[in-house]
Amino acid sequence: MGIASPLGIGVEHVWKRMLNAESGIAAIQNFDVSALPAKIAGQVPQGSKTEGKLDIGEWIPLKDQKKMDRFIQLALVAATEAVEDSGWMPGEDEEEARCATGVMIGSGIGGLESIYEAAQVVAAGRARRLSPFFIPSALINLASGHVSIKYGFKGPNHAVVTACATGVHALGDAARLIALGDADVMVAGGAEGAVNDIGLAGFCAARALSTGYNDTPVLASRPWDEDRDGFVMGEGAGVVVLEEYEHAKARGAKIYAEVIGYGMSGDAHHITAPSDTGDGAFRSMRAALRSARVEPEGVQYVNAHGTSTPLGDDLELGAVERLWGDAGSKLAMSSTKSAIGHLLGAAGAVEGIFSILAIRDQVAPPTLNLHKPSRESIIDRVPREAQQRPIEVALSNSFGFGGTNASIVFRGAP
Amino acid sequence: MSETAEKVKKIVVEHLGVEESKVTNEASFIDDLGADSLDTVELVMAFEEAFGVEIPDDAAEKITTVNDAIKYIEAQQGEADKA
């Protein structure tokens, strides 16, 4: 597994900070936000690898950096950690193994920064001066492309684009490709690098972002709290190596968890708003539990989509309450977006990793800033402090614009 | 080494991320300096910017070595001086 996030680089480093209830949200300093109502974000901290921070030069040679948008760079960082962690790096003489290894890393938005820069060149009447690397830098599937080129993975090469549900769809679809026999190993995840002028302005225009905590950024992402006022944009990437069980066992791979269920649904309701009843979320989770052959009471932890928007948080809560019924009283559900913000297309992959670590370490990560819930519930939303508790099975939700919903279910290593 | 040659080599070093010692006159961008076809397109654009010359696509295709670039640019500059 590999993570690049506002809490830093590296799975163990990020997880430790997450359990310590630290926040990665801060004021934006690398571009001018004076004209915008939202002035904060979760950005990957700059610094050396040894400090758990990102110096892109340590990962990607200078001459290659200009060939890839930031989301691809972040994908490569997370994928490098994940592939090295997995130990699955078939050499040039292992053609069959390489052909059985695929990549499916998606993004919600893709190379927004590259498109923005190219548009400025064209608008200035300098279209002939456009970089030949513009298109391959902006294309979403080039994250998968670059990872496959770096490691020689010649299996299915695919990319998911389902807005903020991208990460979960990538993990779920990749697991299914393995189940269907298309690959033995899939490098899967999501990446996003859209914290820039037009990304921020766009979500501001959609009235989706928190604007009331510009002076106290760490308090801004507060899922389910009465005083929440929108989500906080984040950037980063999460990548996992999924592998057919017998294949992993045979080579003595380190197994963190098993993907046991995956469900999807569509709202068919509105381009940005969730359905009024939370019905899409409900059906997505129900489908995931069905495919896992697990009853709601068999799940001990839910990593919520929980973006800290006024509407979405309580609708998701309501859907979980309906599905779990009385079993909800034994459930822990938290939103790790409270610490890192909303990583959009990377969210589901990073949160999937947190769900797996919750099982490994038997601990539910906290929901920061949850002081006074806007609605009471029998479900423990793990306010402000991590909780040690038995977790055998965990479910992670991601919902996206367009009314697309995805849920994935993990169980501890068999 | 002429001023043009020096400038060309500097651009090649920057864009292809190669060591200066490898950028000899005879060095081929693709065979010796690890460039691909897109790298060479970008390289030609960088020459155009730096020297204020136009390099049409059919001429650009023939610029495959460091020396090709120096010769082409010097010829263009010569034309400009005459004009």
Image: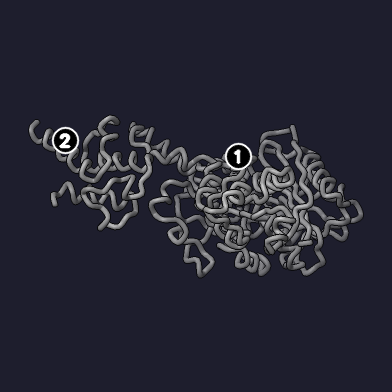
Answer yes or no: is residue A225 visible: no
Q: Chain of mark 1?
A: A
Q: Amino acid at mark 1?
A: Ala
- Residue B76: give its label: 2
Query: Can you say whether A403 is above or below A369 in the image?
Result: above
Among all residues in the image, which is located at the extreme front? A93
**Where does the image place residue A214, in percent across and percent down from the top left?**
56, 55
Q: Quadrant of residue A80?
A: bottom right
A88 vs A369, nearest the viewer: A88
Q: CA distance from mark 2 to mark 1?
A: 52 Å
Color encoding of the figure: one colour
The secondary element bearing badge 2 is classed as helix
Inspect this view and state whether residue A49 appears. Answer: yes
SS of the residue under disc 1: loop
Question: Which residue is most to the left?
Answer: B82
- Where the N terminus of chain A falls, by quadrant? bottom right
Vertical arrangement, residue A7 with respect to residue A259, above or below:
below
Type of the residue with mark 2? Gln
Instruction: Name above or below for residue A409 compared with residue A122.
Output: below
Give the labeled residue for mark 1: A206
Q: To which quarter of the image does residue A279 belong? A: top right
Quadrant including the C terminus of chain A:
bottom right
Q: Which mark is residue A87?
A: none
Residue A56 in the image: state x and y as whole percent: 46, 58
